[in-house]
Image (spheres, grey):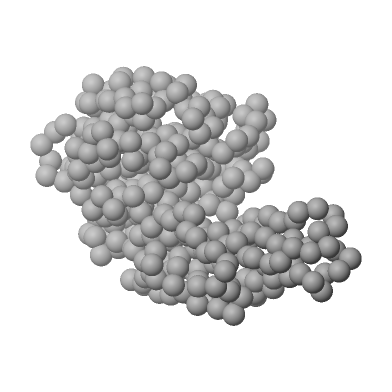
Amino acid sequence: MSRLEETFELVRIDSTSHNEAVLARLVEARLRENPLLEVERIGDNVVARTTGHHATRLLVAGHLDTVPGDVSLARIDGDTLHGVGSCDMKGSLAVMLELASQTSPRSVEVTWVFYSREEIARNESGLLEIAELRPDLLKVDAAILAEPTSGAVEAGCQGTLRIGITMRGRRAHSARPFTGVNAIHRLAALVDHVAKYEPRTVEIDGVSFTEQLQTVAIEGGVAANVVPDIARCTLNHRVAPDRSQAEAVAWLVTYLDGFIESHDIVEVLDWAPSAAPELSNPRLASLVAFTNAAPRGKLGWTDVATFAQLGIAATNFGAGDPLLAHRSDERITRYELDEFADVLRRWLE
């Protein structure tokens, strides 16, 4: 089968988060066909390793799960495969399986990681499960996370901070609002301020990261004839790698100064750390050279941050256009698969 057809086979398997078992079995079976690989199944995660005597070990990782979608709608139209998960990231998985199945010698050892539950809460991640149960399998010199990157290296990643804000008012009859304080109206002023946020861009190790701030949820209201005394919202702040969680929270509190009063509540709901670029690492620098494209900072959060926490130099590099990830018109082309396969093969050789 062609690479596009191999990817189509994977796309037709529903592997929405928590439903990766069927795909994990297929991946495990394919990998066990190569006698040069040691293969281990850890829950719905599959790890395969060459076991020669080379001093350098590289890792290539990809997640098995996708966001929800109807896999029966997947189709090949000429040189393009349409379907949920096609670019995020079953195109990369198909190439990983192809290269892992090869028995030709390499000058490095390779660890292949196919992990579950990336598209949901980070504390459920299969990569963290591997790190907890078998940390020895993740001892490597450098790693690629095969997220879609349009054929270029996307270095590091942004942190993501979710903040909950509860604004207080004073309840009153809606016919006599002057006797109360409308918490929704107070919240509206804050939301309008957030909507006017101008993104901050910072350059780190030659690549740029542009922060973002969005209101992603709003809740409020008591009854149709009541001035509400409580209103809540959730803000999502995408944070450049030069800021820690404490620094990001402190900046956000300062940005909202004048809108938050002492009786309001500001709480951190979730934080996933950022990761700085690792392009000074010789192995990752050589990957950039193979792509013939300038590296850029990763928009959004990825498990490159998890590798960073484990002390592993890592970067994002995979098949497909990241702007198509999670969309109803998600797709990947034969050219994108071939380009990724060529660069990854040369990097591993």
In the image, 229 versus 333, the foreground residue is 229
Residue beneath the point at 39% across and 27% down: 44
Q: Which residue is outermost to the right?
A: 175
| Image coords of residue 217 (percent x, y) | 64, 55
Q: Is residue 63 visible?
A: no
Query: Which of the 4 image quadrants contains residue 27?
Result: top left
Up-down relation of residue 30 to residue 287 (above or below): above
Residue beneath the point at 35% across and 45% down: 344
Up-down relation of residue 290 to residue 251 (above or below): above
Q: Which residue is outermost to the bottom?
A: 258
* Quadrant placement of the C terminus: top left
Residue beneath the point at 53% across and 43% down: 87
State left or right for residue 229 relative to residue 257.
right
| Image coords of residue 6 (percent x, y) | 49, 29
State left or right for residue 232 relative to residue 43.
right
| Image coords of residue 263 (percent x, y) | 57, 69
Query: Which of the 4 image quadrants contains residue 168?
Result: bottom right
Residue beneath the point at 71% across and 66% down: 170
Up-down relation of residue 146 to residue 74 (above or below): below
State left or right for residue 245 relative to residue 119.
left
In the image, 289 versus 245, the foreground residue is 245
